Image (cartoon, rainbow, N blue to C red):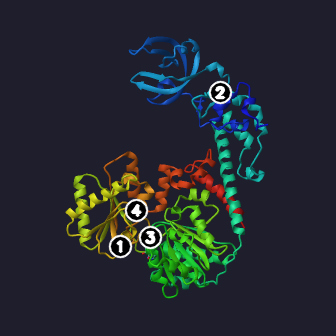
Amino acid sequence: MLKQSIKTIKGIGSKKAEFFASLGVYSLLDLMSLYPFRYEDLSSPSMISDIENEEEAVFLARVLSFESSRSYNGKNILRVNLSDDYSKMQAIFVNSPYIQKLLIKDEIYWFHGKCSVYGKYKSVFHPEFLLYSDKPEGMGIKPVYPLNKDLKQKDIKNALASCENLFDLIEENLPEKIIDKFDLIKKSEAMYAMHFPSSMENVEKARYRLKFEEIYLQQKEIFEKRKLEREKKRKNFYTDVNSEEIFSIYDFELTESQKKTVEDIRCDLKSDAIMKRLIFGDVGSGKTVIAISAAYMALKSSYQTCIMAPTEVLATQHYEEFKKYLSKEAKICLLVASVKEKDRLIKEIAAGRYDIIVGTHALIQENVSFKKLSIIVTDEEHRFGVKQRHSLQNKALDGADTLSMSATPIPRTLSMIYYGNLDISYLVDMPKGRKKIITKFVDGRENKKKLLKFIYDKIKEGEQAYFLAPRIEDDEEKNKSSVEKMVKYFREIFPDFSISYLYGKMNSAEKERRMEAFKKGEISILISTTVIEVGINVPNATIILISGIENFGLSQLHQLRGRVGRGEKQSYCFLTTNKKSPNLMNRVKAMERYNSGFDIAEMDLKMRGPGEILGDKQHGFKLFKLIDYLEDHDLIMKVHKIFLNNED
Ligand code: ADP
Ligand code: MG
């Protein structure tokens, strides 16, 4: 019955049905699920005397008289004098002389519209109005629907009015137990109240129930997936490695989070389900240690591990780090596009000569195969597509374990929604001795001069700096010249420092060489666009100057800042721009205030909304009509817990 087309409603023909279709409304049920986006509370109209400038007000007033005139450009202006017995007001209509026939002198109306106040003179422009006696119950709540240009509020209301008796047919879709436990109203009741509310309280209850349902059904699906995942039984077995043995590989004490995460992985590998773990850890929190530890566990069972990083520079860096800690017991190789004797290397990997294979996308090329690949680690997992990750899995042993690492923590609310089916470890603490990076916005000639002096002194003391050149959209040529301009400028003012640079299109061997020189300290200042990517680790670099910050989102700025603060020395992040805007200054404030990627992610969610943050995962957002990620955090948490507690 509810699946019937809205054309069965009297007054809706093909034409109107098309207009409704553009709002996504085809069936009666669709219509009933078209929720108002706001309500006007006619139960508490304003007094005219209380109305403020720019206020969108609802008020009751009597029509006193009409004044009609012409504007200088020939428009018909109708002024309607109104009064609520205490104060006066004018309603103004342009080119709508027919209004005079609709409004009856001496009658009382509800008015609703945007008001202006100039001294004692108050007016409302093109208000909506409704005869007071047309609403015999007097007061009430008026739903306001999303519209398109062809439909009026009235069309939707009339259509809904003819469905008023059908709401009882709406089927309940939450378990009785849940409805009772959380004191929810029934679905049919809630949907009815959205359109025919008796009070704002009633609306609130209805919205709560419907939001609850949205998140409940979404979590149910996610947890069902998770259950399926967990039913995939382990096929590759590991001998258990003592945690202390793992910790002793390193020449530093692991952070509590690192220890816990290594433990998580140990348990995963012992459990009879395949590991699918996601590691969220801020820049510099030490994710590489996690990858090394996992590789060590695989090594002790004679399996291969591979680590895929998004760029050659990063892969090379990982390779070095792995060699530093595991070169005694493991054979480690680097597979990237520019590697020498690649064919031979690929043959050797296939023959199982290497225990640990570090690389870039080169790892997923067709001719690459592995002998006993059982742990797959992807670094900066969001930089890879689903396909790329899958193709690596296809090269691994059946039922291989996976570990994905990401430096872009997403707010917990979002991770509950999107990664509820994965196991997640968070690296929340930083290695000992790290100091908070001091972040400052630098503006004005004098301050910029001081900044240059400050940088000069620091570099004289042997520290190093990254300078980010303003990025010019996606134009590589312009970006290159933006970098070159900056290089020229700084070589002039800092003639005694060694300054080098990178830009996107530069060939990767050359990039590599310059990065390497910077790492070794042969270069003091490295100027670039964004190629100094996520993950670069040069502990002696203590300064990052980001020019043209308007090019970057908050999370990106935070990522860039993460290039410094990697050693024990105090680090600094300086931000500059020629394009100040309120929005940008909010980002600046957030950067100055927050050092943790988790806080930054929350702020980013507030400023930009979830779609921007999740990128390609945003298609899922259409799932929710009513849920608001920020406002409904507690509700999302509550529902998430229902499922968590039901497990095992
Ligand atoms: P990210 O999480 O950004 O990938 P890295 O793994 O590159 O961080 O680690 C950053 C630096 O911190 C590296 O030089 C690494 O050796 C060092 N490091 C990692 N864990 C610790 C620790 N527990 N104590 C001291 N230094 C650490
Ligand atoms: Mg890293």
Viewer-nearest of discs 2 and 3 = 3
Image quadrant in which you'd find residue 549:
bottom left
- Percent of width and height locating residue 533: 42, 65
- Percent of width and height locating residue 362: 51, 70
Q: Which mark is residue 513?
A: 1
Structural distance between the alpha carbons of marks 1 and 3:
12 Å
> Which kind of residue does numbered mark 3 sit on?
Glu
Q: From the image, which quarter does the N terminus lie in?
A: top right
Determine which residue is flagged by label 4.
560
> Which kind of residue does numbered mark 4 sit on?
Leu
Structural distance between the alpha carbons of marks 4 and 3:
18 Å
Q: How packed is label 3: few (under 14 Cα within 10 Å), some, or many (20 or more)? A: many
Asked whether 504 or 303 is in front, the reply is: 504
- The residue positioned 46% from the left and 82% from the top of the image is 323
* Residue 88 shows in the view: no
Q: Earlier in the sequence, mark 1 or mark 3?
A: 3
> Which kind of residue does numbered mark 2 sit on?
Asp
Q: Which mark is residue 155?
A: 2
Q: Earlier in the sequence, mark 2 or mark 3?
A: 2
Left or right of 647, for residue 437: left
